[in-house]
Image (spheres, rainbow, N blue to C red):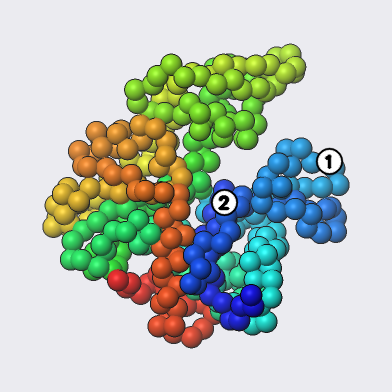
Amino acid sequence: MKLFGSDVGVDLGTAALRMSLKGKGVVLQAPSVLAVEKPSGRVLAVGEEALKMLGRTPANLAAIRPMSQGVISDYDMAVKLLREHLRSILPFSTVKPRLLFSVPGSISSVEERAVVQAGLQAGARKVYLLEAPLAAAIGAGLPIGEAAGRMVVDIGAGTTDVAVLSLGGICASGSIRLGGDAMRDALVRYVRREHGVIIGETMAEEAKGKVGCLTAPGDRSCEVRGRDLLSGLPRLVNLTEAEMPGALEESCLRILEAIRGVLELTPPEMVSDISRNGITLTGGGSRLRGLAETLEEQTHLPVLLADDGEDCVIAGVTRVLDKLDEMRDGPLNLMRRKQLT
């Protein structure tokens, strides 16, 4: 099927890239990784295939994550990653698409410009930006058009965005450069400190998914393999759920501080609304077992987990694609500053 002038939604996340097409929904979900040949820069693999190469490439190859803490850290590689995926979902398009990116609330003007230019260089004719917590709230199905305060906490791989929404707009917000990757790195440091073993990011991510928790640890355990600090030889470590709260609590405390900071900026009437409506958690980081219970205990507010939390942002972006024609012309049109209902 030929697609002409398609509108594409992009969740350019630190860990995963998701793309959707107007009228078709989500059409691509892949790790935000690409493998290139050095020094030519020729792309050899993207997505899952490139992810398998992380930490395993010879001297003439490099597996790269072009995103860090929710923003572009390697501009040239980000352009190549976007271009490859756009070609895969729009193989027969004869007209350049319009792109709608979700961006963290803490993004700077320089980082915004990098996203816009990367999209244009990757093949877009226009680029629009939408703030991630607003997209997450829309994707989670929150009735943000009502005159009532709703709080959403979007915990991604690189950032955590906190926002209070009412009447289709953001009333108070905050963002920290911390997410699921910081929890993974905390686990790497814990294993090194307590067990004297260095493990890789992939191994730590697997362990976090299997035994990661903050409250009511059970008897589950998992084996991780790494390099012994003293001998330099391979060594096996058995990690248990009981160890996880001590390894991950610092990240939880920082998320809690961000929530409290936004509540301090929120009008009393909206705080009252939030006490009734609760806090909605979205993003892949919200899946950490015990996180919702811990936040509920510390804030004394109801905390709800959104269905399919890691897909809420791209779901919201997909819904907003229908509003692109209502926006002003121009390559840098900050839709996120416009109220959406």
Q: Which residue is the extreme one toward the bottom? A: 329
Q: Which residue is mark 2?
A: 16
Which residue does the image show at 64% across and 75% down from the upper left? Answer: 1
Q: Quadrant of residue 94?
A: bottom right
Which residue does the image show at 54% across and 54% down from the upper left? Answer: 13
Q: Are circles 1 and 2 on residues that touch, CB within 8 Å? A: no
Q: Residues within 10 Å of mark 1 (few under 14, many from 20)?
A: few
- The correct choice, above or below, for 106 with respect to 197 in the image is below
Pinpoint residue 319: horizontal percent, then vertical percent. 41, 68
Q: Secondary structure at mark 1?
A: loop
The numbered dot on residue 58 is 1
Which residue does the image show at 45% across and 49% down from the upper left? Answer: 310
Q: Quadrant of residue 172?
A: bottom left
Pinpoint residue 82: horizontal percent, then vertical percent. 65, 64
Nearer the observer, 4 or 143 = 4
Pinpoint residue 147: horizontal percent, then vertical percent. 18, 66
In the shown orientation, is residue 250 left or right of residue 11?
left
Q: Residues within 10 Å of mark 2 (few under 14, many from 20)?
A: many
In the shown orientation, is residue 275 left or right of residue 174?
left
